[in-house]
Image (cartoon, helix red, strand yellow):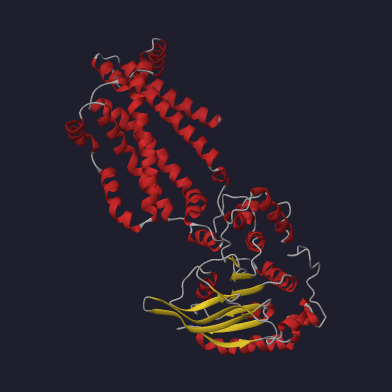
């Protein structure tokens, strides 16, 4: 806890110093940015902005998580589905998304659908691929154990494979959610400037750099909070996960 | 000193004649029979036309050099693998898959790392759909019996290798199967713990009316614990010889290892296996 606080102080201190030198006239100090952040919070602009941004973000992340984990389980359990679907997600992960956005806009317009798509393309592959590899790497001896004690296929999935894969599934979720946040801002910068993306674009155009950095800072803060929440959820669902593992 | 079973306070074998009547091969029926089992993986023949009988209430070891298919045979009996041809009968019923009449003890323990000792021990019962309070009461009893009382809430990574295998054994005992299948259960524990396990196993066979099928690669271990030893030879695997150690086990656990008959059998087995070990 103290270490976390210390590292925050060091990072923000460095920011403050860099802003005061200044490295660039377009780089505000930490305190200026925080003042702008407080202003935007109190006059309500930030809340309206997040109202816009969170809608595609939450829809996209929820779709990515549910479909991603389901697809990952499926791919991990069946060689045939692995052969059929894995390449799609590998291509999705490697695709230069910014270059593909115009195509998405042509197909789905400039509304919510396109933004949700961008977030899904960012978030889903890592969730699918992590889940699939975790499922494939379930120790065969504990699966065999469950079978020898007459566990059904469903019980083996629910009581063996998912708990065994859960740490890696959750690390995929964490990566996917962070990618989803990046996707949400990318969509707002590249498709139509709304929400937080609008604050960033608009503040930059009128050279109000403290507001621009405040908006970026707020989205990072939100992402970190969300990831912590996810960790809580993991500990709640799989309480054995933080108890260490049998290594041999 | 921990003991496997509260029923047997010492591991000294009973001196009465009645206790060893069951060692007579002619009395009693076979709990498990394997009839003309063949198993091949592609072109590789792991087992060929193997026929073997496992007398009820006794411990039969499957002994042989590595690659002789002893674990394959055990998994076929467990119903985890299907034989290419031939059939296994347990109490007269043909095996088509895992069943309530058999329980498996794994070489690598196969414990759930995220589950406490009591959940691990109760896991076999959990898969059979028993209510939580009921299965945990049974599990608690077997945890005591294997000498792990006080560790119910511990997790596997907090236990030593020997203790983990006691959990594996308690799990197999908790489902109360008539046949216990043990796949090199003591090979991953240290030498001293292994000796203790072997002594405890003798009293377990003595006190529980169960049939044990025990895979091992240790000649001494097989001679020490078995009522019947089936020596398997590899490529393709077949039963080379069946040895029934005689009366030396009535002399008590402390005397077995220096009994002339024990030593002779160990030598004799090594002589027949030597040429197969590269």
Q: Nearer the viewer, residue A26 or A168?
A: A168
Q: Nearer the viewer, residue B207 or B159?
A: B207
Say which quadrant the N terminus of chain A sits in.
Answer: top right
Up the image or down, B3 lies above or below A153; here it is: below
Q: Whole-percent x and y of residue A58?
A: 37, 30
Up the image or down, B267 lies above or below A198; here it is: below
Of all residues, the one furthest to the top in this rendering is: A43
Of all residues, the one furthest to the front in this rendering is: B93
Say which quadrant the C terminus of chain A sits in.
Answer: bottom right
Up the image or down, B8 lies above or below B70; here it is: above
Q: Whole-percent x and y of residue B261?
A: 72, 88
Q: Quadrant of residue B45?
A: bottom left
- Is residue B258 in view from this perspective? no
In this picture, residue A162 sits left or right of residue B17: left
In this picture, residue B54 sits left or right of residue A169: right
In this picture, residue B247 sits left or right of residue A133: right
The structure residue drawn at horizontal position 33% and vertical position 32%, both measured from the top left corner, is A182
The structure residue drawn at horizontal position 72% and vertical position 87%, both measured from the top left corner, is B246
Up the image or down, A222 lies above or below B20; here it is: above
């Amino acid at each position: 806890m103290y270490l976390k606080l210390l590292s925050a102080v060091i990072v923000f201190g460095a920011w403050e110093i860099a802003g005061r030198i200044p490295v660039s006239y377009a780089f505000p100090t930490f305190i200026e940015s925080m003042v702008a952040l407080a202003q935007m919070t109190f006059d309500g602009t930030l809340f309206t902005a997040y109202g816009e941004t969170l809608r595609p973000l939450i829809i996209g992340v929820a779709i990515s998580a549910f479909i991603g984990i389901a697809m990952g389980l499926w791919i991990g359990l069946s060689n045939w589905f692995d052969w059929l679907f894995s390449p799609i997600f590998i291509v999705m992960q490697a695709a230069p998304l910014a270059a593909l956005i115009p195509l998405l806009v042509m197909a789905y317009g400039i509304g919510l659908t396109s933004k949700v798509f961008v977030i899904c393309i960012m978030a889903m592959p890592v969730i699918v691929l992590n889940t699939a590899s975790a499922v494939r790497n379930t120790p065969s001896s504990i699966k065999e154990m469950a079978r020898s004690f007459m566990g059904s296929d469903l019980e083996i999935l629910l009581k063996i494979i998912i708990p065994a894969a859960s740490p890696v599934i959750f690390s995929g979720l964490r990566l996917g959610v962070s990618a989803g946040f990046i996707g949400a801002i990318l969509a707002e910068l590249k498709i139509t400037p709304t929400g937080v993306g609008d604050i960033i674009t608009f503040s930059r155009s009128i050279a109000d750099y403290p507001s621009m950095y405040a908006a970026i800072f707020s989205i990072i803060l939100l992402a970190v909070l969300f990831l912590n929440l996810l960790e809580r959820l993991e500990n709640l669902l799989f309480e054995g996960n933080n108890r260490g593992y049998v290594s041999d | 000193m921990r003991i496997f079973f509260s029923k047997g306070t010492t591991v000294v074998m009973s001196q009465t004649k009645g206790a060893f009547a069951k060692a007579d091969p002619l009395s009693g029926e076979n709990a498990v029979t394997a009839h003309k089992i063949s198993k091949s993986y592609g072109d590789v023949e792991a087992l060929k036309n193997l026929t073997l009988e496992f007398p009820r209430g006794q411990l039969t070891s499957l002994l042989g050099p590595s690659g002789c298919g002893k674990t394959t045979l055990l998994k076929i009996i467990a119903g985890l693998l299907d034989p290419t041809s031939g059939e296994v009968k347990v109490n007269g019923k043909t095996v088509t898959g895992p069943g309530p009449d058999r329980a498996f003890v794994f070489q690598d323990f196969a414990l759930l790392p995220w589950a406490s000792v009591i959940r691990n021990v109760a896991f076999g019962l959990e898969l059979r759909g028993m209510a939580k309070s009921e299965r945990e009461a049974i599990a608690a009893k077997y945890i005591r019996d294997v000498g792990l009382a006080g560790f119910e809430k511990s997790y596997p990574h907090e236990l030593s290798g020997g203790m983990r295998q006691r959990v594996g054994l308690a799990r197999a005992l908790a489902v109360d199967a008539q046949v216990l299948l043990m796949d090199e259960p003591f090979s991953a524990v240290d030498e001293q713990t292994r000796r203790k396990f072997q002594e405890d196993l003798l009293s377990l066979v003595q006190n529980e009316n169960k049939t044990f099928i025990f895979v091992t690669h240790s000649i001494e271990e097989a001679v020490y614990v078995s009522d019947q030893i089936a020596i398997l030879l590899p490529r393709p695997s077949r039963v080379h010889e069946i040895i029934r150690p005689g009366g030396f086990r009535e002399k008590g656990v402390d005397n077995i290892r220096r009994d002339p008959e024990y030593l002779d059998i160990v030598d004799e087995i090594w002589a027949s296996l030597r040429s197969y070990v590269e």
